């Protein structure tokens, strides 16, 4: 193999393909990036038996060929290179990399031992890259992080016709986002549980493009793959087994109280009051007509109290939340005005966003948060 490629193009491609390489690969070849030069392009691939990544970039190809090199080392080198064209050439079991006055020689790994990347599943439809990245970011925050409960570490993707619904939960909150997309067939129907971290990384990395293609393979539970493609990049990941709890019945439709608060001052007040909240202790919120009182701490320790203007329809309500979960929800609604809807102080509250104080709530994104029971 002998090619020439622009430094920035190569560095970005290597960084993207190498991001999913395992830190402790079960076999040495899985630490490698597979570089394949043919025609006027260079493709770079990484695979760890769970997630695959492949990106193609333009390159001047003098000699076609395939080589496997340490992905993390190549990424580190490419990041540090001067802004000059890069020449890559194989010489036996070594690869030379020349960029300006810099020259590196890398050992290759055995290509024949590298596993074949999974085939891209059948394309099911396309989504706006910006909408996809935003929606995944809003929902992934509520996914569990405990690997002993793998089903809760996923984001559920439900497709019905031209509507996609994303959902996740860690048992303490539930996030749901709905948006439209362009399916390949009008009667498309599918459900997939995708690892949240992989989905979030993928959505962020494809956000700079115009559209993202979503591809699904239909197989037995847990054996299916989901694929995403955009901007010359494609990635696949194995689906998680199982499904999330039936969540639609968890979201209340009737409320005794609805509070409306401007989001930025609400966020700042929660952050300030939470400074005195010991680990795992809640922030208490008391809503009365025209005012919200936030409190944290105890009489035996530091205390904080703050009041904000708030509009309340219905009964007065006092409720307590984990401040971290509340702040993540307020950040995720991405709206100038927050709406909190309550049934009782011991049941989950529904957080949604409003574009303005007098506007209707946006039902596309809903964040259900469990209250913390207060002793006494």
Image: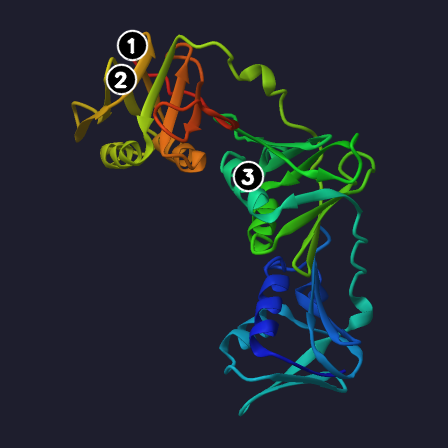
Pointer 2 and pointer 1: residues touching (CB < 8 Å)?
yes
Q: Residue at x 25, y 33 (%)?
A: 269
Residue 155, quarter of the rendered image: top right
Q: Of residues 346 and 86, which is closer to you in this image? A: 86
For the question of whether residue 282 can be seen, the reply is: no
Return the residue at label 1. 316
Return the residue at label 2. 286
Q: Residue at x 79, y 61 (%)?
A: 115
Q: Earlier in the sequence, mark 2 or mark 1?
A: 2
Spatial separation of the CA atoms under disc 3 and disc 1: 33 Å
Q: Secondary structure at mark 1?
A: loop
Spatial separation of the CA atoms under disc 2 and disc 1: 8 Å
Q: Is residue 270 above or below residue 67?
A: above
Q: Earlier in the sequence, mark 3 or mark 2?
A: 3
Q: Is residue 334 above or below residue 22?
A: above
Q: Of residues 50 and 44, which is closer to you in this image? A: 44
Spatial separation of the CA atoms under disc 3 and disc 2: 31 Å
Q: Secondary structure at mark 3?
A: helix
Quadrant containing the N terminus is: bottom right
Q: Is residue 134 above or below residue 371?
A: below
Q: Position of residue 56 (x, y in %)?
A: 70, 67
Could you classify mark 3 by the number of other residues whose Cα lies within 10 Å: few (under 14), some (14-19), or many (20 or more)? many
Return the residue at label 3. 135
Outermost residue on the bottom side: it is: 101
Q: Residue at x 73, y 53 (%)?
A: 49
Could you classify mark 2 by the number of other residues whose Cα lies within 10 Å: few (under 14), some (14-19), or many (20 or more)? some
Pointer 3 and pointer 2: residues touching (CB < 8 Å)?
no
Q: Position of residue 157 (x, y in %)?
A: 66, 34
């Amino acid at each position: 193999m002998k090619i020439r490629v622009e430094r920035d193009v190569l560095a970005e491609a290597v960084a993207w393909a190498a991001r999913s390489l395992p830190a402790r690969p079960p076999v040495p070849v899985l630490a490698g990036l597979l570089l394949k030069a043919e025609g006027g392009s260079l493709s770079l691939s990484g695979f760890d038996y769970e997630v695959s990544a492949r990106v193609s970039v333009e390159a001047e190809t003098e000699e076609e060929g395939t080589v496997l090199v340490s992905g993390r080392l190549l990424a580190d080198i490419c990041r540090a290179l001067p802004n000059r064209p890069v020449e890559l050439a194989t010489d036996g079991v070594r690869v030379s990399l020349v960029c300006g006055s810099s020259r590196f020689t890398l050992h290759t790994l055995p290509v024949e031992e590298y596993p074949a990347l999974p085939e891209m599943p059948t394309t099911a439809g396309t989504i706006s890259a910006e909408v996809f990245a935003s929606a995944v970011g809003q929902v992934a925050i509520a996914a569990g992080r405990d690997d002993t409960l793998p089903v809760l570490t996923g984001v559920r993707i439900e497709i019905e016709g031209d509507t996609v619904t994303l959902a996740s939960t860690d048992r303490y909150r539930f996030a749901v986002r709905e948006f439209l997309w362009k399916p390949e067939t009008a009667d498309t129907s599918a459900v997939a549980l995708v690892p949240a971290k992989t989905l979030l990384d993928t959505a962020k990395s494809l956000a700079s493009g115009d559209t993202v293609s979503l591809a699904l393979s239909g197989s037995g539970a847990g054996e299916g793959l989901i694929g995403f493609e955009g901007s010359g990049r494609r990635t696949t990941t194995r689906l998680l087994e199982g499904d999330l709890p039936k969540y639609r019945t968890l979201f209340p439709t009737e409320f005794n109280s609805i509070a409306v608060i401007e989001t930025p001052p609400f966020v700042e007040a929660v952050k300030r009051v939470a400074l005195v909240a010991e680990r795992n202790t809640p922030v208490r919120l008391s809503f009365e007509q025209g005012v919200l009182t936030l409190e944290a701490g105890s009489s035996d320790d530091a205390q904080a109290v703050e009041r904000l203007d708030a509009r309340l329809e219905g009964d007065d309500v006092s409720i307590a939340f984990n401040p971290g979960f509340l702040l993540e929800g307020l950040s995720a609604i991405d709206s100038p005005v927050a709406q909190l809807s309550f049934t009782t102080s011991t049941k989950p509250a529904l957080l949604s966003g409003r574009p303005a104080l007098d506007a209707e709530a946006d039902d596309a994104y809903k964040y259900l948060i469990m209250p913390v029971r207060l002793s006494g």
